Amino acid sequence: MPRATAVLAISLLCCGVPVLRGQSGDLLKRGVQAYQALEYDAAAALLEQSLGRDSTTGVADSLRAKALTYLAATELFRGQRDSAVGAFRQLVLLNPRYRPDELIFPPQVTNLFQEVRRATRAIAVAVPPVTQLRTRLERFTARVLASSLADVAVTLAQEDGTPVRELYKGPVADSVVVTWDGLTAAGAPADNGRYVLRVTPRTLTADGPRARQVPLEVKQEPPDTLAWPPPLTTPPLLPEQTSSGPAFRSLAAGLVAGTAAVALPSIIAQGKDATGARFAVGAAVGVAGFVGFFAHKPRPLEANVRANASQRDAWKKKLDAVKAENATRLRTVRLVVRAGPETIAERGSE
Amino acid sequence: MERRDLEPGLLSVNAIPWGSVYLDGRPVGNTPQIDLSVTPGAHRLRVEREGYRPYDRMVDVASGQRLRITDIALVER
């Protein structure tokens, strides 16, 4: 039966039977099953086929890494050490930090992998798919990975190659986190547009690691500003003087009563002349009204004035803080950075 | 026919996770083991790994038989 499976798998390859897209995962699964069943010829055929599909359909790197690991182990156990080394080398180039699962793969496999990893110099860069940041205050982060000690330069350039900022220059033993505050070398927020984050070995050799790059699309977004604090009203402000109502009531009462004292007798007893005494009474009552008015004139309430002053100071401090924060926010720019897939940079761009 | 004149059987063993294989108490290496030559008859097969319950079975291998035991799943203790 195992032989039959192997023959079937190989005949499928040789006859060029079309394999539908999206079957890479299935091929990988069957390849792993064949590996586990010790049907190494079938496993190698299926795993290689799954990798072939990957290159055209863009299946995730994680699946590709898994397929390469099983393929290398398969080749090793069927006595094809060079093929195993080749598969592991591809794996290291694909992801310098990838490690075969030591629970699944025995030491003869993991030891070979380590040997290949040490001999294969590779770098990679990993970035989050979307980053939102406020320039100067927050940072975009990229993790640079290396299979072995590498001396690299990490730069940001416009899509046409115009340099924007050098982000890092130095060694990477295993990985290093590189950050960008959203500013150009001149200190200005990056404009909207397409950029390239590139990791380049500083010493270029034929067998050295290849430069890696990630396209970035940067878009500016207006910052959010804070609302001002609500204006102070009464309450919570306290009245700062006594009411003017009693004064006006005293004045009005005096004037009305004085006028009445003069006018009422003439209205009630028509034809009689007013005496001077009535005018004197009316004037006296009117004057009393004026006296009452001045006696009840509004007076300042010192305690309330002090309390209100304190509240006004606090409110003004809040307003000043909001204004300062808004000014800071308006000085910064919110950037949205979208990253594309990592690729190997062309030789010319290194 | 005497037992030693019989054609040996071939035993292949694999496990997840990988483990150390013992045949009749004698260590033969890590999994996977492919086409171990064994005398016909009953043998004690043991696969063990630290932190896992060992797989321990008697297996009968006939003369000329090619026996594969590849579905061993070691379980954590």
Image (tube, rainbow, N blue to C red):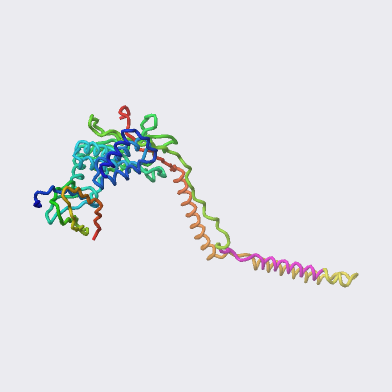
Q: Is residue A259 magenta?
A: yes
Give the main secondary structure, helix, strand or loop, of the magenta stretch. Answer: helix
Which residue occupies 31% across, 37% down?
Answer: A49
Q: Is residue B13 left or right of residue A63?
A: left
Residue A277 position within the rendered picture, expressed as x and y whole percent measured from the top left: 81, 72
Residue A320 position within the rendered picture, expressed as x and y whole percent measured from the top left: 48, 51
Q: Which residues are magenta?
A: A238-262
Which residue occupies 20% across, 36% down?
Answer: A82
Name the one closer to the observer, A159 or A268. A159
Name the one closer to the observer, B37 or A149. B37
Which residue occupies 49% across, 50% down?
Answer: A226
Residue A150 position within the rendered picture, expressed as x and y whole percent measured from the top left: 23, 37
Q: Is residue A204 above or below residue A29?
A: above
Name the one closer to the observer, A190 or A347. A347
Asked whether residue A304 is in view, the answer is yes
Residue B71 position within the rendered picture, expressed as x and y whole percent measured from the top left: 25, 52
Q: Is residue A186 left or right of residue A283?
A: left
Picture quarter containing residue A134?
A: top left
Question: Which residue is most to the front?
Answer: B1
Picture quarter containing residue A255?
A: bottom right
Q: Is residue A226 magenta?
A: no
Q: Is residue B32 left or right of residue A131?
A: left
Asked whether residue A142 is in view, the answer is no
